[in-house]
Image (cartoon, rainbow, N blue to C red):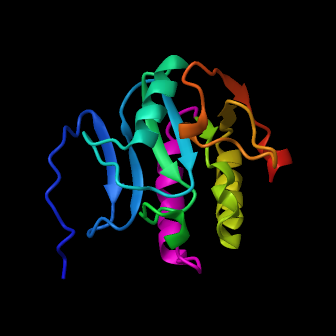
Amino acid sequence: MLANIKKMNYDKEKWIYENDQVNRIRYVLGTKGKKTLLCFGINPSTAEPNNLDNTLKFVERLSITNDFDSWIMINVYPQRTTDPNNIHKKIDNNIHERNLNFIKKIISKKETTIWAAWGTLIEKRPYLIDCLIDIYNLSKKYNCKWITIGKLSKNGHPHHPLYINSKEKIKDFNMESYI
């Protein structure tokens, strides 16, 4: 049954939104602008255009604080779940490849600053680091700049947006060393 399908009503001049037909996968959510901060988390939750969850409210706020006029949220793995323990046990390569295609579409258009913001959840499934390596390799082709906001975790992971002070400023993030 496709009970999860609902007609989305949002301003397509303001919002960027890409998901699957039954809303179990979200590839892209963000706003349009000239200076966009591309944020990478682990997996999407419930946020939609005009209905941001707390994570994306922080992403929006931290983007503005750091002089960006728009933001886009993409995730290392695009499966929607409110509980990271429910992320697929094994990778679905079809959604991973589609995720990479959306990422390429975004970063190939203009100079891109990418905010590493996945937190310690990168350790949740062994394949997540492989997905991140694919994303990083793609970003190198387009000379993307990687940044983080706030301190790194004790294991060297960039913090999730919910755990960052809203006045924190961006810092360069060495993805080559991190990977």
Residue 81, image quadrant: bottom left
- Please determine whether, in this image, residue 32 is positioned above or below residue 169: below
Examine the rendering and report whether any part of residue 60 can be seen: yes
- In front here: 49 or 32? 49
Residue at 52% in and 77% down: 92
Could one spot residue 108 in this view of the protein?
Answer: no
> Residue 145 location, x and y as percent?
68, 34
Question: From the viewer's perspective, is 50 left or right of 26?
Answer: left
Coordinates of residue 2 in the picture (x, y in percent): 19, 77
Identified at 46% across, 44% down, the residue is 73
Residue 95, compared with residue 29, is above or below; it is: below
Q: Residue at x 24, y 39 (%)?
A: 50
- Based on the displayed image, in which of its 4 quarters is residue 14 positioned? top left
Residue 22 in the image: state x and y as whole percent.
27, 70
Question: In the figure, 129 relative to 36: above or below?
Answer: below
Q: Name the residue at the right extreme.
A: 177
Q: Which residues are magenta?
A: 87-112
